[in-house]
Amino acid sequence: MTVRSRAATLAITAVLCAGAAPAAVAAPSPSPSPSADLPPGLYGTKDPTYDGVWRQSVAFLAQKIELVTPATQSVDWLVGQQCADGAFASYRDASVPCDDKTVADTNATAAAVQAMVELAVHREVVDKGVAWLKSVQNEDGGWGYNPGSPSDANSTAVVIGALARAGVPLAALTKEGDRTPYTALQSFALPCGGKDGGAFAYQPDKNGKLTANADATAAAVLGSMGKGMAAGTSNAVKAPMCHKGTDPTPEQSAQNGAHYLAGALAASGHLELPPMPGAEDTEPQPDFGNTADAVVALAASGHTDKAAGAVAYLEKNAQGWAKEGGPAATAQLVLAAHATGTDARDFGGVDLVAQLNATGPAPAATAVPSPTATAQEPKDTSGDDGGLGVWWLVGIGLACGAGIGFLLSGRRKNQQL
Protein backbone atom coordinates (compact mmCIF):
# COMPACT_ATOMS: atom_id res chain seq x y z
CA MET A 1 0.00 0.00 0.00
CA THR A 2 2.55 2.41 -0.14
CA VAL A 3 2.15 6.09 0.06
CA ARG A 4 4.26 7.60 -2.55
CA SER A 5 2.49 8.96 -5.58
CA ARG A 6 -0.34 6.51 -5.23
CA ALA A 7 -2.83 8.48 -7.25
CA ALA A 8 -0.42 9.00 -10.12
CA THR A 9 0.58 5.36 -10.13
CA LEU A 10 -3.01 4.20 -10.22
CA ALA A 11 -3.83 6.65 -12.96
CA ILE A 12 -0.92 5.36 -15.04
CA THR A 13 -1.95 1.78 -14.35
CA ALA A 14 -5.51 2.52 -15.40
CA VAL A 15 -4.29 3.91 -18.71
CA LEU A 16 -1.89 1.05 -19.43
CA CYS A 17 -4.43 -1.59 -18.49
CA ALA A 18 -7.50 -0.02 -20.05
CA GLY A 19 -9.72 -2.66 -21.54
CA ALA A 20 -7.78 -5.47 -19.93
CA ALA A 21 -8.87 -5.18 -16.31
CA PRO A 22 -11.80 -7.25 -15.05
CA ALA A 23 -14.79 -5.35 -13.78
CA ALA A 24 -13.84 -5.97 -10.16
CA VAL A 25 -10.50 -4.22 -10.66
CA ALA A 26 -11.62 -1.32 -12.81
CA ALA A 27 -10.90 2.09 -11.32
CA PRO A 28 -13.67 4.67 -11.02
CA SER A 29 -13.81 7.43 -13.57
CA PRO A 30 -11.56 10.34 -12.63
CA SER A 31 -13.31 13.17 -10.86
CA PRO A 32 -13.04 16.75 -12.07
CA SER A 33 -9.87 18.64 -11.28
CA PRO A 34 -9.79 19.58 -7.59
CA SER A 35 -11.18 22.94 -6.69
CA ALA A 36 -12.67 24.84 -3.80
CA ASP A 37 -15.46 22.24 -3.93
CA LEU A 38 -13.24 19.62 -2.31
CA PRO A 39 -14.49 18.59 1.15
CA PRO A 40 -13.08 20.94 3.78
CA GLY A 41 -11.90 18.08 6.00
CA LEU A 42 -9.80 16.42 3.29
CA TYR A 43 -6.02 16.64 3.44
CA GLY A 44 -4.24 17.88 0.33
CA THR A 45 -5.44 19.87 -2.66
CA LYS A 46 -4.83 17.47 -5.53
CA ASP A 47 -7.37 15.21 -7.19
CA PRO A 48 -8.37 12.66 -4.53
CA THR A 49 -10.02 10.19 -6.92
CA TYR A 50 -7.43 7.48 -6.48
CA ASP A 51 -5.98 8.25 -3.06
CA GLY A 52 -8.31 10.39 -0.96
CA VAL A 53 -8.90 7.82 1.78
CA TRP A 54 -5.33 6.54 1.60
CA ARG A 55 -3.63 9.91 2.02
CA GLN A 56 -6.01 10.94 4.80
CA SER A 57 -5.35 7.71 6.68
CA VAL A 58 -1.59 7.79 6.30
CA ALA A 59 -1.55 11.43 7.36
CA PHE A 60 -3.40 10.47 10.55
CA LEU A 61 -0.93 7.67 11.24
CA ALA A 62 2.02 10.04 10.88
CA GLN A 63 0.37 12.71 13.03
CA LYS A 64 -0.53 10.26 15.78
CA ILE A 65 3.04 9.01 16.23
CA GLU A 66 4.11 12.65 16.50
CA LEU A 67 1.49 13.34 19.16
CA VAL A 68 -0.77 15.39 16.94
CA THR A 69 -4.55 14.92 17.20
CA PRO A 70 -6.27 15.75 13.92
CA ALA A 71 -9.35 17.96 13.82
CA THR A 72 -12.74 16.33 14.32
CA GLN A 73 -13.73 17.66 10.90
CA SER A 74 -10.96 15.64 9.26
CA VAL A 75 -11.75 12.46 11.15
CA ASP A 76 -15.44 12.85 10.37
CA TRP A 77 -14.60 13.14 6.68
CA LEU A 78 -12.79 9.81 6.76
CA VAL A 79 -15.55 8.13 8.76
CA GLY A 80 -18.07 9.39 6.22
CA GLN A 81 -16.22 7.68 3.41
CA GLN A 82 -17.07 4.23 4.76
CA CYS A 83 -19.85 2.30 3.06
CA ALA A 84 -22.61 0.61 5.05
CA ASP A 85 -20.99 -2.80 4.52
CA GLY A 86 -17.71 -1.59 6.08
CA ALA A 87 -15.72 -1.10 2.88
CA PHE A 88 -14.01 2.08 1.73
CA ALA A 89 -13.59 3.17 -1.86
CA SER A 90 -10.45 5.06 -2.83
CA TYR A 91 -12.65 8.17 -2.73
CA ARG A 92 -16.34 8.79 -3.19
CA ASP A 93 -19.08 11.38 -2.94
CA ALA A 94 -20.34 10.59 0.55
CA SER A 95 -23.65 12.33 -0.11
CA VAL A 96 -24.56 9.38 -2.34
CA PRO A 97 -24.97 5.94 -0.71
CA CYS A 98 -22.66 3.17 -1.86
CA ASP A 99 -24.16 0.75 -4.37
CA ASP A 100 -23.01 -2.08 -6.63
CA LYS A 101 -21.15 0.45 -8.77
CA THR A 102 -18.99 1.64 -5.89
CA VAL A 103 -15.49 0.22 -6.38
CA ALA A 104 -14.41 -1.06 -2.99
CA ASP A 105 -10.68 -0.82 -2.22
CA THR A 106 -8.97 -3.21 0.21
CA ASN A 107 -5.94 -0.94 0.55
CA ALA A 108 -8.01 2.14 1.41
CA THR A 109 -10.10 0.10 3.84
CA ALA A 110 -7.04 -1.37 5.55
CA ALA A 111 -5.37 2.04 5.81
CA ALA A 112 -8.50 3.61 7.30
CA VAL A 113 -8.79 0.78 9.83
CA GLN A 114 -5.17 1.31 10.89
CA ALA A 115 -5.76 5.05 11.24
CA MET A 116 -8.85 4.60 13.39
CA VAL A 117 -7.07 2.09 15.63
CA GLU A 118 -4.18 4.49 16.18
CA LEU A 119 -6.45 7.45 16.84
CA ALA A 120 -8.48 5.31 19.26
CA VAL A 121 -11.80 6.65 18.04
CA HIS A 122 -14.78 5.24 16.16
CA ARG A 123 -14.35 1.59 17.03
CA GLU A 124 -17.49 0.87 15.02
CA VAL A 125 -15.60 1.93 11.89
CA VAL A 126 -12.79 -0.45 12.77
CA ASP A 127 -15.13 -3.36 13.45
CA LYS A 128 -17.12 -2.87 10.24
CA GLY A 129 -13.92 -2.50 8.21
CA VAL A 130 -12.45 -5.65 9.74
CA ALA A 131 -15.62 -7.63 9.04
CA TRP A 132 -15.60 -6.54 5.42
CA LEU A 133 -11.90 -7.33 4.93
CA LYS A 134 -12.42 -10.80 6.36
CA SER A 135 -15.39 -11.33 4.03
CA VAL A 136 -13.35 -10.65 0.88
CA GLN A 137 -10.31 -12.81 1.69
CA ASN A 138 -9.32 -14.87 -1.35
CA GLU A 139 -9.19 -18.64 -1.30
CA ASP A 140 -5.38 -18.54 -1.37
CA GLY A 141 -5.49 -16.70 1.96
CA GLY A 142 -4.56 -13.27 0.59
CA TRP A 143 -6.22 -10.16 -0.77
CA GLY A 144 -6.23 -8.31 -4.07
CA TYR A 145 -6.57 -4.58 -4.57
CA ASN A 146 -10.30 -4.91 -5.18
CA PRO A 147 -12.56 -7.73 -4.02
CA GLY A 148 -12.31 -10.66 -6.40
CA SER A 149 -9.04 -9.59 -7.98
CA PRO A 150 -5.99 -11.89 -7.62
CA SER A 151 -4.02 -11.59 -4.43
CA ASP A 152 -0.93 -9.40 -4.46
CA ALA A 153 1.83 -8.88 -1.91
CA ASN A 154 1.09 -5.23 -1.17
CA SER A 155 -2.63 -5.63 -0.59
CA THR A 156 -2.16 -8.77 1.49
CA ALA A 157 0.42 -7.03 3.64
CA VAL A 158 -1.55 -3.86 4.35
CA VAL A 159 -4.63 -5.89 5.21
CA ILE A 160 -2.60 -8.09 7.55
CA GLY A 161 -1.31 -4.96 9.26
CA ALA A 162 -4.85 -3.64 9.68
CA LEU A 163 -6.23 -6.90 11.07
CA ALA A 164 -3.28 -7.31 13.44
CA ARG A 165 -3.60 -3.75 14.73
CA ALA A 166 -7.33 -4.34 15.28
CA GLY A 167 -6.58 -7.40 17.39
CA VAL A 168 -7.77 -10.07 14.96
CA PRO A 169 -6.16 -13.52 15.50
CA LEU A 170 -4.85 -14.11 12.02
CA ALA A 171 -4.43 -17.84 12.62
CA ALA A 172 -8.22 -18.07 12.47
CA LEU A 173 -8.32 -16.72 8.91
CA THR A 174 -7.63 -20.08 7.30
CA LYS A 175 -8.97 -21.15 3.94
CA GLU A 176 -9.22 -24.65 2.49
CA GLY A 177 -5.88 -26.42 2.48
CA ASP A 178 -4.66 -24.50 5.53
CA ARG A 179 -4.08 -21.41 3.43
CA THR A 180 -3.56 -18.36 5.61
CA PRO A 181 -2.58 -14.74 4.95
CA TYR A 182 0.98 -15.86 5.64
CA THR A 183 1.01 -18.61 3.01
CA ALA A 184 -0.41 -16.14 0.50
CA LEU A 185 2.28 -13.61 1.30
CA GLN A 186 5.08 -16.14 1.11
CA SER A 187 3.88 -17.31 -2.31
CA PHE A 188 5.31 -14.03 -3.65
CA ALA A 189 8.78 -14.59 -2.12
CA LEU A 190 11.82 -15.28 -4.28
CA PRO A 191 13.99 -18.08 -2.90
CA CYS A 192 17.40 -17.32 -1.48
CA GLY A 193 20.46 -18.04 -3.56
CA GLY A 194 19.62 -16.10 -6.71
CA LYS A 195 20.36 -12.52 -7.71
CA ASP A 196 17.27 -11.16 -5.97
CA GLY A 197 16.97 -13.81 -3.31
CA GLY A 198 14.79 -12.85 -0.38
CA ALA A 199 12.81 -10.23 -2.31
CA PHE A 200 9.07 -10.35 -2.87
CA ALA A 201 7.22 -9.87 -6.12
CA TYR A 202 4.01 -7.88 -6.38
CA GLN A 203 2.34 -10.74 -8.28
CA PRO A 204 3.55 -13.51 -10.57
CA ASP A 205 3.42 -12.68 -14.27
CA LYS A 206 1.20 -14.59 -16.69
CA ASN A 207 3.80 -17.35 -16.83
CA GLY A 208 4.03 -17.60 -13.08
CA LYS A 209 7.43 -15.92 -12.88
CA LEU A 210 8.23 -13.78 -9.85
CA THR A 211 10.15 -10.53 -10.33
CA ALA A 212 11.66 -8.70 -7.38
CA ASN A 213 9.78 -5.55 -6.40
CA ALA A 214 11.21 -3.29 -3.71
CA ASP A 215 7.83 -1.79 -2.85
CA ALA A 216 6.25 -5.22 -2.42
CA THR A 217 9.28 -6.37 -0.43
CA ALA A 218 9.08 -3.49 2.03
CA ALA A 219 5.38 -4.13 2.52
CA ALA A 220 5.91 -7.88 2.88
CA VAL A 221 8.56 -7.41 5.55
CA LEU A 222 6.06 -5.52 7.70
CA GLY A 223 3.32 -7.99 6.87
CA SER A 224 5.44 -10.98 7.75
CA MET A 225 6.01 -9.48 11.19
CA GLY A 226 2.37 -8.55 11.70
CA LYS A 227 3.06 -4.84 11.82
CA GLY A 228 1.15 -1.88 10.51
CA MET A 229 2.52 1.03 8.53
CA ALA A 230 3.34 3.10 11.62
CA ALA A 231 5.99 0.65 12.79
CA GLY A 232 8.78 1.62 15.12
CA THR A 233 12.30 0.32 15.61
CA SER A 234 12.73 -3.29 16.72
CA ASN A 235 15.51 -4.56 18.92
CA ALA A 236 18.72 -4.98 16.95
CA VAL A 237 19.41 -8.42 15.58
CA LYS A 238 22.28 -9.83 13.60
CA ALA A 239 22.87 -8.53 10.09
CA PRO A 240 20.01 -9.65 7.84
CA MET A 241 20.62 -12.92 6.07
CA CYS A 242 18.66 -14.94 3.59
CA HIS A 243 17.34 -18.16 5.13
CA LYS A 244 17.40 -20.93 2.58
CA GLY A 245 14.74 -23.59 2.63
CA THR A 246 11.34 -24.32 1.16
CA ASP A 247 9.25 -23.52 4.22
CA PRO A 248 10.58 -20.45 6.04
CA THR A 249 8.73 -19.04 9.02
CA PRO A 250 7.12 -15.61 8.65
CA GLU A 251 9.94 -14.15 10.72
CA GLN A 252 12.53 -15.71 8.43
CA SER A 253 10.68 -14.37 5.39
CA ALA A 254 10.81 -10.90 6.93
CA GLN A 255 14.56 -11.23 7.45
CA ASN A 256 14.96 -12.47 3.88
CA GLY A 257 13.18 -9.37 2.63
CA ALA A 258 15.29 -7.16 4.87
CA HIS A 259 18.41 -8.81 3.44
CA TYR A 260 17.30 -7.87 -0.07
CA LEU A 261 16.41 -4.28 0.90
CA ALA A 262 19.70 -3.74 2.73
CA GLY A 263 21.58 -4.82 -0.37
CA ALA A 264 19.45 -2.65 -2.66
CA LEU A 265 20.16 0.44 -0.55
CA ALA A 266 23.82 -0.25 0.12
CA ALA A 267 25.33 1.31 -3.00
CA SER A 268 23.56 4.68 -3.34
CA GLY A 269 21.40 4.96 -0.25
CA HIS A 270 18.22 5.02 -2.29
CA LEU A 271 16.05 2.94 -4.60
CA GLU A 272 15.43 3.94 -8.19
CA LEU A 273 12.45 4.37 -10.47
CA PRO A 274 12.92 2.92 -13.95
CA PRO A 275 12.19 5.35 -16.81
CA MET A 276 8.62 5.43 -18.05
CA PRO A 277 7.99 3.73 -21.40
CA GLY A 278 8.67 6.19 -24.20
CA ALA A 279 10.32 8.78 -21.96
CA GLU A 280 13.14 10.82 -23.48
CA ASP A 281 15.14 10.67 -20.28
CA THR A 282 16.20 7.06 -19.92
CA GLU A 283 18.13 7.59 -16.70
CA PRO A 284 16.47 6.08 -13.62
CA GLN A 285 15.31 8.59 -11.05
CA PRO A 286 15.43 8.34 -7.25
CA ASP A 287 12.41 6.59 -5.79
CA PHE A 288 11.89 8.56 -2.59
CA GLY A 289 8.64 6.86 -1.61
CA ASN A 290 9.90 3.31 -1.84
CA THR A 291 13.15 4.33 -0.17
CA ALA A 292 11.17 5.65 2.79
CA ASP A 293 9.16 2.42 2.90
CA ALA A 294 12.36 0.38 2.83
CA VAL A 295 13.69 2.42 5.75
CA VAL A 296 10.60 1.58 7.81
CA ALA A 297 10.85 -2.11 6.90
CA LEU A 298 14.53 -2.33 7.83
CA ALA A 299 14.06 -0.53 11.13
CA ALA A 300 11.02 -2.60 12.03
CA SER A 301 12.91 -5.82 11.34
CA GLY A 302 15.81 -4.83 13.58
CA HIS A 303 18.21 -3.27 11.08
CA THR A 304 18.12 0.46 11.69
CA ASP A 305 21.85 0.57 11.02
CA LYS A 306 21.24 -0.66 7.48
CA ALA A 307 18.75 2.16 6.95
CA ALA A 308 21.03 4.97 8.16
CA GLY A 309 22.44 5.80 4.74
CA ALA A 310 18.96 5.96 3.22
CA VAL A 311 17.73 8.24 6.00
CA ALA A 312 20.66 10.58 5.39
CA TYR A 313 19.86 10.55 1.66
CA LEU A 314 16.21 11.36 2.27
CA GLU A 315 17.08 14.18 4.66
CA LYS A 316 19.27 15.74 2.00
CA ASN A 317 17.19 15.15 -1.11
CA ALA A 318 13.54 14.34 -0.45
CA GLN A 319 12.11 17.57 0.97
CA GLY A 320 11.01 18.97 -2.38
CA TRP A 321 9.43 15.68 -3.36
CA ALA A 322 7.50 15.49 -0.10
CA LYS A 323 6.18 19.05 -0.32
CA GLU A 324 5.07 18.57 -3.92
CA GLY A 325 3.69 15.11 -3.20
CA GLY A 326 1.38 16.40 -0.50
CA PRO A 327 0.20 14.73 2.71
CA ALA A 328 0.91 11.11 1.73
CA ALA A 329 4.49 11.81 0.69
CA THR A 330 5.22 13.96 3.74
CA ALA A 331 3.67 11.29 5.94
CA GLN A 332 5.98 8.67 4.44
CA LEU A 333 9.00 10.66 5.55
CA VAL A 334 7.51 11.14 9.01
CA LEU A 335 7.01 7.37 9.30
CA ALA A 336 10.58 6.75 8.17
CA ALA A 337 11.90 9.28 10.67
CA HIS A 338 9.86 7.75 13.47
CA ALA A 339 11.00 4.21 12.70
CA THR A 340 14.65 5.20 12.91
CA GLY A 341 14.49 7.61 15.83
CA THR A 342 15.16 10.61 13.58
CA ASP A 343 13.65 13.99 14.45
CA ALA A 344 10.73 14.55 12.08
CA ARG A 345 10.55 18.16 13.23
CA ASP A 346 14.07 18.77 11.97
CA PHE A 347 14.44 16.39 9.06
CA GLY A 348 17.25 17.86 7.03
CA GLY A 349 16.21 21.26 8.34
CA VAL A 350 12.52 20.78 7.53
CA ASP A 351 9.72 20.44 10.09
CA LEU A 352 7.82 17.58 8.47
CA VAL A 353 5.16 17.59 11.17
CA ALA A 354 4.30 21.24 10.57
CA GLN A 355 4.36 20.61 6.82
CA LEU A 356 1.94 17.72 7.21
CA ASN A 357 -0.35 19.62 9.55
CA ALA A 358 -0.57 22.46 7.02
CA THR A 359 -2.10 20.15 4.40
CA GLY A 360 -5.34 19.82 6.38
CA PRO A 361 -7.47 21.59 8.98
CA ALA A 362 -5.66 22.86 12.06
CA PRO A 363 -5.10 19.97 14.49
CA ALA A 364 -7.30 19.64 17.55
CA ALA A 365 -4.23 19.21 19.77
CA THR A 366 -0.48 19.01 19.47
CA ALA A 367 2.35 18.10 21.79
CA VAL A 368 6.10 18.26 21.25
CA PRO A 369 7.51 14.93 22.46
CA SER A 370 10.34 15.01 24.96
CA PRO A 371 13.42 12.81 24.37
CA THR A 372 12.44 10.55 27.26
CA ALA A 373 8.67 10.51 27.08
CA THR A 374 7.70 10.04 23.48
CA ALA A 375 4.69 7.91 24.39
CA GLN A 376 2.92 10.68 26.28
CA GLU A 377 -0.56 11.61 25.16
CA PRO A 378 -1.05 15.04 23.60
CA LYS A 379 -2.62 17.68 25.78
CA ASP A 380 -5.87 19.05 24.43
CA THR A 381 -5.20 22.69 23.69
CA SER A 382 -8.41 23.38 21.82
CA GLY A 383 -11.12 22.76 24.37
CA ASP A 384 -13.96 20.40 23.55
CA ASP A 385 -13.36 19.06 20.06
CA GLY A 386 -15.90 16.32 19.81
CA GLY A 387 -14.22 13.73 21.98
CA LEU A 388 -11.06 13.16 19.99
CA GLY A 389 -9.13 13.12 23.25
CA VAL A 390 -10.82 9.88 24.34
CA TRP A 391 -8.21 7.12 24.04
CA TRP A 392 -9.94 3.74 24.31
CA LEU A 393 -8.12 0.49 24.72
CA VAL A 394 -4.70 1.96 23.94
CA GLY A 395 -3.04 -0.99 25.62
CA ILE A 396 -4.73 -3.45 23.28
CA GLY A 397 -3.71 -1.41 20.26
CA LEU A 398 -0.08 -1.27 21.35
CA ALA A 399 0.03 -4.97 22.09
CA CYS A 400 -1.34 -5.83 18.69
CA GLY A 401 1.16 -3.47 17.10
CA ALA A 402 3.97 -5.37 18.76
CA GLY A 403 3.10 -8.31 16.56
CA ILE A 404 1.07 -10.47 18.97
CA GLY A 405 -1.46 -11.17 16.27
CA PHE A 406 1.26 -12.54 14.04
CA LEU A 407 2.75 -14.79 16.68
CA LEU A 408 -0.52 -16.70 16.65
CA SER A 409 0.02 -17.82 13.09
CA GLY A 410 2.88 -19.45 11.28
CA ARG A 411 2.40 -17.69 8.00
CA ARG A 412 1.72 -14.22 6.64
CA LYS A 413 1.95 -11.46 3.96
CA ASN A 414 2.66 -7.78 2.47
CA GLN A 415 1.63 -3.81 0.73
CA GLN A 416 1.52 1.88 -2.82
CA LEU A 417 0.84 6.49 -3.42
Image (tube, grey):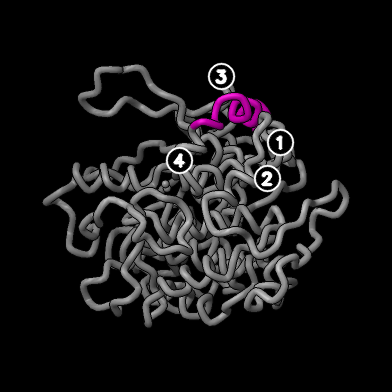
Give residue 103's quadrant in the image: bottom left
C-alpha gap between disc 4 and disc 3: 26 Å
Check residue 9 in the rendering and tell me which mark sits there, or answer none: none
C-alpha gap between disc 3 and disc 1: 26 Å
In this view of the protein, which residue sits in the foreground, 363 or 9?
A: 363
Give residue 283's quadrant in the image: top left
Q: Residues within 10 Å of mark 4 (few under 14, many from 20)?
A: many
Q: Residues within 10 Å of mark 2 (few under 14, many from 20)?
A: many
Check residue 339 in the rendering and tell me which mark sits there, or answer none: 2
Asked whether, in this view, residue 144 is left or right of residue 323, the answer is left
Say which label, 3 or 1, has the lower sequence index: 3
Q: Answer yes or no: do the residues labelled 4 and 2 have beta carbons within 8 Å? A: no
Q: Residues within 10 Å of mark 1 (few under 14, many from 20)?
A: few
Say which label, 4 or 3, has the lower sequence index: 3
Q: Which residues are magenta?
A: 307-320
Q: Residues within 10 Å of mark 3 (few under 14, many from 20)?
A: few
Task: Inspect the image, locate mark 1, and give the three-letter code of the amino acid beneath it.
Answer: Asp
Q: Secondary structure at mark 1?
A: helix
Location of residue 97 in the rendering, given as x and y in whole percent from the top left corner? 30, 80
Say which label, 4 or 1, has the lower sequence index: 4
Residue at image mark 1: 346
User: Is 232 included in the stretch rendered in magenta?
Assistant: no
Q: Is residue 78 above or below residue 333?
A: below
